[in-house]
Image (spheres, rainbow, N blue to C red):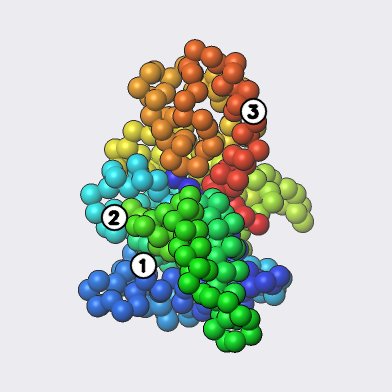
Amino acid sequence: MYITITPQKLGANYAQSSTDFVGYLEKENQGLEQQEMEHFFNQYDDEIAAEEVVKEIDSNTAKLKKIEPKFYSITVSPSKYELNRLQNNSKDLKTYTRELMKDYVSSFNREIKGRPVHIDDIKYYAKIEHQRSFKGTDLKVKENQPYATKILALKNEIRKISQGREHGTTKLLQQQIKKLEQKAPHQLNGKRIVQGMNKPGNQSHIHIIVSRKDASNTFSLSPGSKHKASQVEMHGKTVKRGFDRDMFFERAEKTFDKTFGYNRNFAETYKARKEFVKNPNLYFAALMKLPANEKALAFKIMTKTGLPVVPSIPVSQAQVALRVFKRLRRGVEVVLKSSSIGI
């Protein structure tokens, strides 16, 4: 399970309207019949129009400055193992979203009129998507990039020859392009993987847009608070503040497991990924204590979900394996950020 929480920005400034973001989330509905579309929903309603989402989010920004985020985007990406547990992706992920947002509000160390934050205190809209495309930052795209650069240079030569700006034959250049396309290390259906190409397999995930202000447009509820969970004296009163991110991520996993009867492996937990970066010795010690079948699955999951680990590490050579883990620690920090809040 990978969860990110980000304040929506346009360049260096925060977006003043949710229009562009909501429009982006409508991209998969283009060309589909009404019954095939995935609609926005919230805690109680289904099939909410995009125009209503924009109106409700944009009008719920009282007293917020231009330098403050008006809304946050939460992206929830279950692993292929978690998705395999679902019976109906759209229906089950919608059920999970509504339980997840209860975990979200309970992670605020805040009170509204003397009581904890409740699900009805927030204004959010969610949407299920079933496709993902390769980004320029994806490892497969980056490793194919040297080939892409050479191919682009050859295509430029061909264009110059075709325009009469250079002399030569294009046939040889086209043959070189064909060879480079075939040599690229990462292919999909016989084609070189490039940025923008749809990823294969089950890619279902959840996008959630949640207002910075509470539903009454009175109180500010920021998951990006620098204060984890604390109390402070303000004007002679004790005020609770902060958002416990670790609590939210851990509860999100437990809620999924409880809702769908999922048996989570050690390597899939947010706590384990965090331990890998902060204390690889303890992480490795815990991994080696797992029963043989769970240990084997853990190594398999780590290779499939982004944790850079050598699959053939000999279990009997613990010290050798630990040194490998330490060398890879820096790379895993990127993976940990996938389950974090980007502020």
SS for callout 1 = loop
SS for callout 2 = helix
Quarter of the image with the C terminus is bottom right
Q: Are circles 1 and 3 on residues that touch, CB within 8 Å? A: no
Q: Nearer the viewer, mark 2 or mark 1?
A: 2
SS for callout 3 = helix
Q: Quick one: 85 or 330, which is closer to the camera?
A: 330
Q: Position of residue 233 (x, y in %)?
A: 75, 49
Question: Which badge, 2 or 1, is on the more N-terminal residue?
Answer: 1
Amino acid under disc 2: Asn
Amino acid under disc 1: Phe
Which residue shows up at 64% across the image and 50% down it? 242
Q: Residues within 10 Å of mark 1 (few under 14, many from 20)?
A: many
Say above or below: 166 vs 284. Answer: below
Q: Residues within 10 Å of mark 2 (few under 14, many from 20)?
A: some
Residue receiving disc 1: 41
Q: Is residue 290 visible?
A: yes
Amino acid under disc 3: Lys
Q: Residues within 10 Å of mark 3 (few under 14, many from 20)?
A: some
Furthest-right residue in view?
235
Say above or below: 66 vs 175. Answer: below
Furthest-top residue in view?
316
Task: Give how far apart the Cα atoms at labels 1 and 3 are.
Answer: 44 Å
Question: Which badge, 1 or 3, is on the more N-terminal residue?
Answer: 1
Q: Position of residue 319 (x, y in %)?
A: 60, 16
Task: Give how far apart the Cα atoms at labels 3 and 2 are.
Answer: 37 Å
Q: Is residue 56 visible?
A: no
Residue receiving disc 3: 326
Residue 178, label in figure: none
Q: Nearer the viewer, mark 3 or mark 2?
A: 3
Residue receiving disc 2: 89
